[in-house]
Image (cartoon, rainbow, N blue to C red):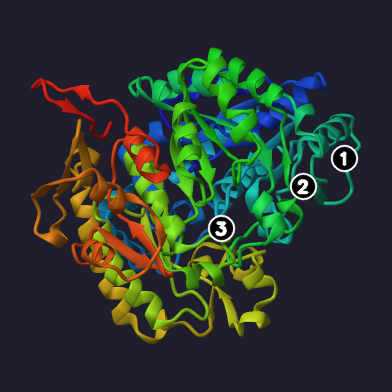
Amino acid sequence: MQAELKEKIYSLVNQAEILLVAPPFMPLDRPSLGLHMLQAAAADADLNVGILYVNQLLAAEIGMEAYQTICEAPKGWLPGERFFSRAAYGTPAWGYRSDSFFDALDRSMTPHPPKRKLLDLEKKAGPFMDALASLIAYSPCRVLGVMGAQDLNNPGIALIKRVKEENPQISTFMTGPNCEGSLAEGVAALHPSVDHVLSGECETLFVGYLQDTLTGTPMEDRILEAEPVISLDNLATPNYAQYYEQLQLFLPEEDKLATSSWIPYETSRGCWWGQKQHCTYCGLKDASLRFRLKSPDRVIEELTHLLATSPSNRVCMADNLMPQDYLENLLPRIKNELPPTRIFYQQKANLSLEQMDLLRQSGVAAIQVGIEALTSNVLSLLHKGSNARQNIMMLRYARALGIDLKWNLFWGVPDDSEQDYQQTRDLIPLLTHLQPPEAYLPLSIDRFSPYFETPEKWEIQDIRPIPSYADVNPAHIFPEEVASHFLARYESAGFREPRLVGRIQVLLARWHKYWAAGVNSAETLRIVYYGKRFLLLDTRSVTGGNKSRFLAEEEARALMQTRPYLPSPEMDKAIKEKLAVVVDDWFVPLITAKIDLLKAFETGAPLPKARSGATGKPIVDLV
């Protein structure tokens, strides 16, 4: 570690008796919500807690490109755990079976440095933690805590064990999503240098833990389980100043990172849908599903403060799912009472066009939607509470509104059928004008999910951790003690007929290629309004590209209205021309249009007034 970097760290770690660490490989583009919520809770109790962004430090040490490579590498190979496995437990460099990891990295779409450079960079992991631990061990620090993440234990272990070796008097703990429920036992077993594991929603527990520890009466139980917070309005507001200060200190050349960073914030905890019906694959604990939300007044108050004290206007909502009530009592207030804001929110796929437009008007520019499948049978198997028709409509609405849509497709779902894959295969080429999925993922059997907790309901057998857990953990640990993701045996057409999965993967790769240069160069299928005439534009490869024709209003409306399918010349013509599909006996249009025109088509309302284009001709087009 460079001397200049050591001096910067030294000035920080000497400011507080209580130090919390954001370890590698947490994302660099946002503060840690969990750490700053603990810091704010402690501040309310007059306890001074400092936060050290070790993820930024490592990025400064090994370079941004290498850091981002490891962050974005195939998650199933646990790249962050591999980088620190030798520093934590003395495994071979990059863990066991490292050649398989590098082969997977080469097959992935992630640009990355050559294997030789990655091997050289890993050699820095141990010395990096040695230097950091020495600075902490001989500082005023009395309590050291590391915020982990799912499948991210080893950086914390590598640091904590070194600190304890140099100064056994420092009390240490780990907390975070990696310490939920039964995982806490596994984290505690990783190394005896971890004095305590704080599990659950720890704001209140954390204050009591600190008070007892600082007065010399630490809690006897090694694993401390927190009760869920009942009133979110009573939680303290986080202060992200140290994140921005350390960006300037450690990564001064990344001057755009602060202004483009996300402000993490939560408006609710739990999941209102999961509380009704737990999605079969969802890894939220039953206790964590309990739905609680902040009052709109509290949300507006806190967001006003956070936006005023941040160089960024981008807010990343950490909610598992946006509360439904907010469509009426919060989003209009965000639109009217906050400065221009770019918001990310997780959504359910059954939103109407009006609701999607309200999201856009309120600054929700990016959403993660639980689509997961394009057939209603698979959605029913997953207990999604939505259908394929709604998923397609969601994709159309997002394209028309210019909302960035994050979504995934699953394969290998218990009891899925060949027909599900065939229908998906046939549908994908028709959707290439809409935003493609982020990934086509094999279903993971996740800890705490219904598939994991009650596998007998789906005849799921032989549940076992994904192999990478054995590659990155010490020999005395059974991988299932710390694993969040598992494999299993069960009936699935995806396993019986891998050629079906392979064909879909080829189609998805082609779809991604169409969107590689962004939305402005993507294929299109839309209606443009010229006053009394409508122009249908279709540049999709599946129809030959660059097709256009004028439509009468009656035909345009008929092409854009979702309704039950009844065989007729107009519906059958639209389907033959690949302008619509039949899904679950419904006629589902695929064409997009500008939002006002799309609303008029859907509701039967009067058409919007056309505006004059650059040529002097009236035109209504996509935004």
What is the x, y in percent for residue 415? 51, 81
Q: Identify which amino acid the numbered label 1 is placed on.
A: Pro
When asked about the image quadrant of residue 18, the answer is top right
What is the x, y in percent for residue 413? 49, 74
Specify which label sits upstream in the sequence, 3 or 1: 3
Q: Which of 558 and 547 is in front in this view?
A: 558
What is the x, y in percent for residue 462? 59, 83
Q: Is mark 2 on a helix, strand or loop?
A: strand
How packed mark 2 is, by other alpha carbons closer than 10 Å (few <14, some 14-19, many 20 or more), is many
For the residues labelled 3 and 1, the Cα–Cα distance comes to 27 Å
Please give the residue where the numbered disc 2 appears in the rendered image: 196
For the residues labelled 3 and 2, the Cα–Cα distance comes to 19 Å
Q: Identify which amino acid the numbered label 3 is placed on.
A: Tyr
Please give the residue where the numbered disc 1 appears in the rendered image: 218
Specify which label sits upstream in the sequence, 3 or 2: 3
For the residues labelled 1 and 2, the Cα–Cα distance comes to 10 Å
Q: What element carries label 3?
A: helix
Q: Is mark 1 on a helix, strand or loop?
A: loop
Q: Which residue is drawn at 28% across and 74% down?
A: 502
